Image (cartoon, rainbow, N blue to C red):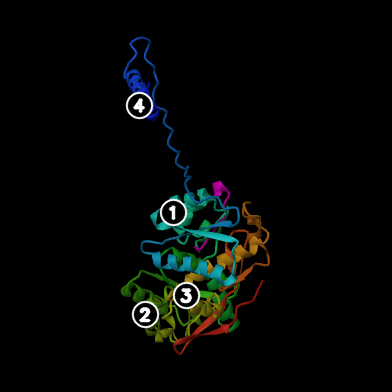
Amino acid sequence: MADPATRPQRLTQLKRAVFLFGLLVLSACSSVVPRTGPPVETGPAVVAPPPRPPVVMPGLPTDNEHHMVALLVPLTGTNAGVGKSIANATQLALLDTNNSSLRITTYDTATGAAAAAQRAIDDGARVILGPLLAEDVRIVAPIARRAGVPVISFSNDSSLAGSGAYLMGYSPGQSIERVVDYAADQGITTYGGLVANGIYGQRSSTAFLRAVEAAKGQVISLQNYEHSAASAAAAAARLGKAGPMGAILIVDDGAAAAGVVPLMRKNGETGARVLGTERWNAEASVAAKPSLNGAWFASVPDNLYRQYAVKYRARFGTAPYRLSSMGYDAVLLTIRIARDWRIGAPFPEDRLRDKGGFSGIDGAFRFGRDGIAERALEVQEIRGGTTVVISPAPTGF
């Protein structure tokens, strides 16, 4: 018989032996590979498809909160300076009016006017401000017309107006008519002309003849010349042979006209009043030309422009181009029309022909049925190195 003291120890050894035997059985079972039955096919691994990239549409994103306006001007090339100045002027107009309803996007016409116009239309523009150059307006207008988008251009080429194209540019014909009317009011009845060759000169000559006729005056002699000192001297000599005249219109820029006047005086026209065109107002140095002292020319008013020029310089650190005021006024015009223009709807083109017209830095103006801006002009006299207003512009129509 076993000793009671050793019984628990034996039980413990027995349990340990049973436990080890069980481990050996499990180990043997796990090493057996079945030799019967078909293999299990798990198939290819399932991989989640990569996420699709977002679809990016060309052009600007859809904007349902602003009126979409395109500005087409040259931002590169030889005319980049005036184009950038116009673009700056449009931004200044938005700031000055604290307007947030317009979204103006600028497109460079120097890299292709047709492509710029099409991009603007594809981006959702409902009205185009610009272009600046006549050749660009000729390209852009048909593209915009097909899309039903009006063009408010800064050109003064009257042959481009109509069929959805409007011209804000300063017309030489209106300037000449205004200064001739003023001269007639001062008692001048006989006129002569010295005209530089070119399209501008041709149109100015026609306007001059009509203006003098309407004022009951007479054109005694009208002479053309090439852009050379010899040609200008010959034209002045021919003019002098026609006899003394009350006033002589010089159709050229201010710097060139300053060189023509001494030739005219030398050939006997010592008492004639010199008349100029609106181009002189775009030249800051014209008043400093001694030979032009006492000359008259008609142009858009300058009083508001001087204030604008100060603000422009303060913001952009440089002086604006004189033509940039048209960009400012084009924005004012658009803001006024926008009061009755539902966002997303076509631009209400009929509002451009409001008889009351519009007002801006360059004074009052309105578009006629022909699409050309009729402007209220003032007459200035060059006097002692500056310009003096001798006949103020009307404030309206």
| Residue annotated with mark 2 | 259
Residue 343 magenta-highlighted: no
Residue at (37, 78) in percent of width and height: 237
Of residue 49 and residue 62, the one placed in the foreground of this image is 49
* Residue 149 in magenta stretch: yes
Amino acid carrying mark 1 in the image = Ala
**Residue 270 image offset from top left, x and y in percent:** 43, 86
103 up-or-down from 23: above or below: below
Query: Depth check: 186 or 286 in front?
Result: 286
Say what amino acid the circle numbered 2 marks.
Gly
Of helix, strand and loop, which one carries label 3? helix
Q: CA distance from mark 4 to mark 1?
A: 103 Å
Give the alpha-carbon distance from disc 1 to disc 2, as whole Å: 37 Å
Image mark for residue 13: 4
The location of residue 25, given as percent across then percent down, is 35, 19
Taking depth in this image into account, of 97 and 142 the one nearest to the observer is 97
- Which of pointers 3 and 1 lies earlier in the amino acid sequence? 1
- The kind of secondary structure element at disc 2 is helix
Which residue was labeled with disc 1?
113
Q: Quadrant of the N terminus?
A: top left
The mark lying in front, picked from 3 and 4, is 4
Would you say residue 162 is visible in this rendering? Answer: no
Q: Residue 110 location, x and y as percent?
A: 40, 57
- Mark 4–mark 1 CB contact (< 8 Å): no
Residue drawn at point x = 34 percent, y = 77 percent: 233
- The quarter of the displayed image where residue 367 is located: bottom right
Is residue 230 in view? yes
